[in-house]
């Protein structure tokens, strides 16, 4: 028999050793699940075993005091097993229903809200922002904290037509995701090039190959190898900035925030969809981003009032139509919302070849 591959440090670890024993025992043999109250899920296995999951919101960026506090709660009030969800919530699993309420109280007493299940607004999936990444045009953790403070009630109550997933993205190109409401940086001016640094810092062929519309060309500036940008072609995406920091695109005034709605990855009830731009040019106004919060709350309030039970955001918009979406939310419709660009096949830089 071939030898087993030795474990490596990268990649997803085997989850079984960390899983609650009831979940390991009944893996793949669950009879049904239900949702007794916001933030609590109940699963019963074919064997008759039961397990309750309590979901609490966290601030995601945590110091070790917070992690120890959450772990102590798991030991004292839970069964000692937790997991973090993709949206930075923490879930406690308990095999005894009588532990649920004391666990909820212990979490609430420490300031952790219980919710984010079923037809609530889930925690915002967020990117690294100023804390960890080298290219963000805005913060992500800060936007999330500011916004979730405003959406607290929508997290702890299940009053939306269906689940609402939000995401942030602090650049236009990388790890922000599809969501019912996505908050994304929007650059509005082409990069300014610091020519003195390009030759020392950048691999020019990689930068040229990065541009999706082939707007960058190698150039000699003041006798030094540098780059130039055809500003008529540039779509201000910011893709040239990560491999070449002298292509400065982040700007306190011209880097704005845009809001996109109607994206989803789920294929339940309707197929996955791409989100679409509904608000642009919002100020990147740290530390509370009030203009962004106002638009998000306006969209959520309209969806809550007008959506039918179990309609996801895009199902609601598909039913009423985009003109009605703009009328009901009161968001201005401008020429920038018209998606009529058909040049992708001819213009998009789909190869790694360098163009001169
Ligand atoms: S979205 Fe962009 S800027 Fe933000 S963390 Fe991801 S790669 Fe960095
Ligand atoms: S990569 Fe994006 S921002 Fe940079 S020049 Fe090309 S289109 Fe403009």
Image (cartoon, rainbow, N blue to C red):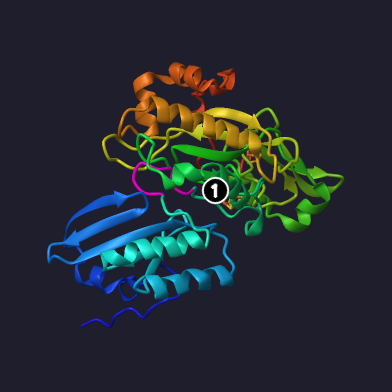
Q: Is residue 85 above or below residue 347?
A: below
Identify which residue is drawn at 36% across, 24% down. Answer: 318
Q: From this viewpoint, is residue 276 visible?
A: no
Q: Is residue 313 above or below residue 238?
A: above
Q: Nearer the viewer, residue 320 or 34?
A: 34
Q: Is mark 1 within 8 Å of ligand 1?
A: yes
Q: From this viewpoint, is residue 160 visible?
A: yes
Identify which residue is drawn at 44% across, 37% down. Answer: 180
Which quadrant of the structure image shows residue 291? top right
- Give the magenta range: 116-123
Number of labelled discs?
Answer: 1
Identify which residue is drawn at 41% across, 75% down. Answer: 76
The residue tagged 1 is: 174
Which quadrant of the structure image shows residue 95? bottom left
Q: Position of residue 194 (x, y in %)?
A: 80, 47
Q: Is residue 143 magenta?
A: no
Q: Is residue 340 above or below residue 300?
A: above
Taking the image in four quarters, ligand 2 sits in the one at top right
Q: Is residue 189 above or below residue 32?
A: above
């Amino acid at each position: 028999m071939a030898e087993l591959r030795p474990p490596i440090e990268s990649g997803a670890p085997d989850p079984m050793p960390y899983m609650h024993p009831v979940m390991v025992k009944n893996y793949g043999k669950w009879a049904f699940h239900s949702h007794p109250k916001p933030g609590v899920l109940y699963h019963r296995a074919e064997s008759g075993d039961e397990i309750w999951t309590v979901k609490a919101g966290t601030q995601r960026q945590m110091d070790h005091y917070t992690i120890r506090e959450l772990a102590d709660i798991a030991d004292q009030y839970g069964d000692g097993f937790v997991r973090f969800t993709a949206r930075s919530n923490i879930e406690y699993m308990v095999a005894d229903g009588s532990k649920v309420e004391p666990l909820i109280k212990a979490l609430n007493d420490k300031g952790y809200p219980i919710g984010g299940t079923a037809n609530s607004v889930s925690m915002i999936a967020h990117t690294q922002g100023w804390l960890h990444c080298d290219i963000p045009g805005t913060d992500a953790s800060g936007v999330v904290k500011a916004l979730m403070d405003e959406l607290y009630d929508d997290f702890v109550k299940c009053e939306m037509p269906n689940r609402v997933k939000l995401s942030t993205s602090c650049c236009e190109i990388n790890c922000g995701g599809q969501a019912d409401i996505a908050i994304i940086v929007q650059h509005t001016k082409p990069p300014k090039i610091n020519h003195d640094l390009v030759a020392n810092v950048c691999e020019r062929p990689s930068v040229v190959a990065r541009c999706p519309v082939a707007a960058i060309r190698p150039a000699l500036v003041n006798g030094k190898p540098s780059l130039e940008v055809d500003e008529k072609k540039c779509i201000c995406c910011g893709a040239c900035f990560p491999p070449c920091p002298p292509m400065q695109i982040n700007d306190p005034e011209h880097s704005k925030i845009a809001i996109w709605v109607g994206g989803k990855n789920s294929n339940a009830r309707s197929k996955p969809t791409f989100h679409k731009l509904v608000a642009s040019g919002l100020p990147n106004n740290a530390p509370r981003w009030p203009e962004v919060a106002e638009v998000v709350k306006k969209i959520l309030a309209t969806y809550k009032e007008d959506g039918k039970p179990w309609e996801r955001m895009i199902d609601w918009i598909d039913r009423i139509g985009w003109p009605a979406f703009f009328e009901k939310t009161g968001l201005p419709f401008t020429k920038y919302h018209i998606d009529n660009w058909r040049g992708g096949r001819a213009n998009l830089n789909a190869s790694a070849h360098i163009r001169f």
